Image (cartoon, rainbow, N blue to C red):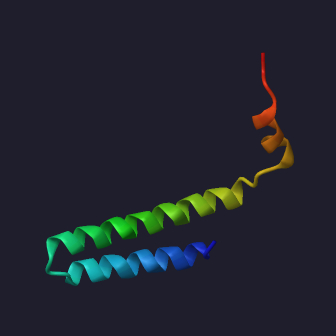
């Protein structure tokens, strides 16, 4: 995975590019791409603060009756 700050930087770059774009379809696509980069950064930040443990993975396979 990329560094969180790198993902945010890329999102900002895409938003700036979208502001300059004349074609509405391309502008919307760039904005959606920027939103995805922000989402990835947020997901990565959450993952870093909530590391997966072996016990958590094992719980997935244990049936609770």
User: Residue drawn 14% across and 80% down?
Assistant: 22
Q: Quadrant of the C terminus?
A: top right
Q: Quadrant of residue 15?
A: bottom left
User: Residue drawn 78% across and 21% down?
Assistant: 64
Q: Is residue 34 above or below residue 65?
A: below
Q: Is residue 5 above or below residue 43?
A: below
Q: Position of residue 9 (x, y in %)?
A: 47, 80
Q: Residue furthest top?
A: 65
Q: Quadrant of residue 43?
A: bottom right
Residue 65 is left or right of residue 18, and the answer is right
Residue 10 is left or right of residue 56, and the answer is left
User: Residue drawn 28% across and 69% down?
Assistant: 29
Q: Quadrant of residue 6?
A: bottom right
| Count of marks, rendered view | 0
Nearer the observer, 20 or 24: 24
Q: Position of residue 3 (x, y in %)?
A: 61, 76
Q: Position of residue 58 (x, y in %)?
A: 83, 39
Residue 25 is left or right of residue 12, and the answer is left
Q: Is residue 22 above or below residue 54?
A: below
Q: Position of residue 52 (x, y in %)?
A: 76, 51
User: Residue drawn 15% across and 77% down?
Assistant: 23
Q: Quadrant of the N terminus?
A: bottom right
Residue 59 is left or right of residue 11, and the answer is right
């Amino acid at each position: 995975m990329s560094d969180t700050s790198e993902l945010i930087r890329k999102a900002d770059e895409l938003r700036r590019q979208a502001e300059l774009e004349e074609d509405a379809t391309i502008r919307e696509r760039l904005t959606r791409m920027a939103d995805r980069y922000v989402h990835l950064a947020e997901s990565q930040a959450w993952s870093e603060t909530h590391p997966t443990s072996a016990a958590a993975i094992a719980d997935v396979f244990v049936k609770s009756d």
